[in-house]
Structure formats: C-alpha cells, structure tokens
Image (cartoon, helix red, strand yellow):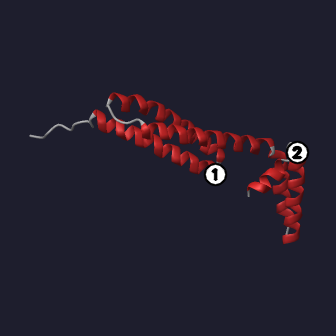
Amino acid sequence: MTTPVQAPGGQQLAESAGRRAIWLAIAALAMTFMLPLAGLVMAVFALVAGFRAVPLLRGAGRSQGVAVGGIVVATVSLMLSASATAMQLYLMDEYSAYQECLKGAGTVQAKSACFDGFRDAAAAKLPPGVIDFLKSVQ
C-alpha cells in the first residue's frame, strides 16, 4: 500500500510564491544591466508574481515583506529597463552608424574617431547637458 502524495500546505505555497517574487525581481534587475529589453520583460513577470504572492501570504498569516520587496525591486528594474530601452530605440540610428564605423576601423585611433562621432551625434540629438551629466555619473 502506498501513501498518497500530499500537495504542499498553504503556508509552504505562500512562502514559495514570496521567494519566487523576490528572485524574479533580482533576476530582472541583473538582466536590466545586461539586456534592458529582457530586463523589462522579466520585471513584468516579477511584478505579476509579487502581486499574486501578497494575497497568498496574507491568507496564510505570513509576513508579506518578501513579496513587497520583490514588487519594489521589480518596479525599480522596470523603470531602469524601460528608460534604457527607450534610450536605445531613440539613439538607434546613431548606434548603427557607430557599429558600421567600427567595422572599417582597423586602428585604435580610428575606433576612437568612431566613438567621438557617436558621442557628437548623440549629443546633438539629446537635450543639452545630458552628456555632461552622464560623464559626471561615471
């Protein structure tokens, strides 16, 4: 005679939902710095997981801190990845020209000239002071 397999209890299910939300949010933040568009998609999944985990944790009588933390981290990741993706789309033509320039650049000086051209083209397209702000952040 075999014993029936029991599904995880309500508390275990709620705790795993909270952990899933925070881990997805951390993964979304990491993906934001590598591939902003992938970070954007991952952040949406993390937000959904976080919002689904809160009622489960509340119903199980557990702390919702992990799920709320996941929601906060996912929101920050969503804002960062959305702005990075928007910037990439806005400067797509300049970046394509930069990539084409790099294909023909055989020396360090030529590559430096390509980057200078990209920086000048981006500075012309962006509002005044953005390039200076980005330099000060580095």
Query: Residue 122 in the image: x percent, y percent?
Result: 86, 49
Residue located 12% across and 40% down the image: 2
Answer left or right for 109 relative to 14: right
Q: Which amino acid does label 2 sit on?
A: Pro
SS category of the residue bearing label 2 = loop
SS category of the residue bearing label 1 = helix
Residue located 86% across and 54% down the image: 119
Mark number displayed over residue 127: none
Residue tagged 1: 33
Query: Residue 19 in the image: x percent, y percent?
Result: 41, 43
Of 123 and 34, nearer the camera is 123
Residue located 84% across and 55% down the image: 98
Answer left or right for 119 relative to 86: right
User: Disc count in the image?
Assistant: 2
Of 117 and 61, nearer the camera is 61
133 in relation to 17, above or below: below
Query: Residue 35 in the image: x percent, y percent?
Result: 64, 49
Quarter of the picture holding the C terminus: bottom right
- Mark 1 closeness class: few <14, some 14–19, many ≥20 residues within 10 Å: some
Query: Residue 33 in the image: x percent, y percent?
Result: 63, 51
**Would residue 96 be seen by someone viewing this image from the given angle?**
no
Among the 4 quarters of the image, the one containing residue 42: top right
Of 50 and 97, nearer the camera is 50
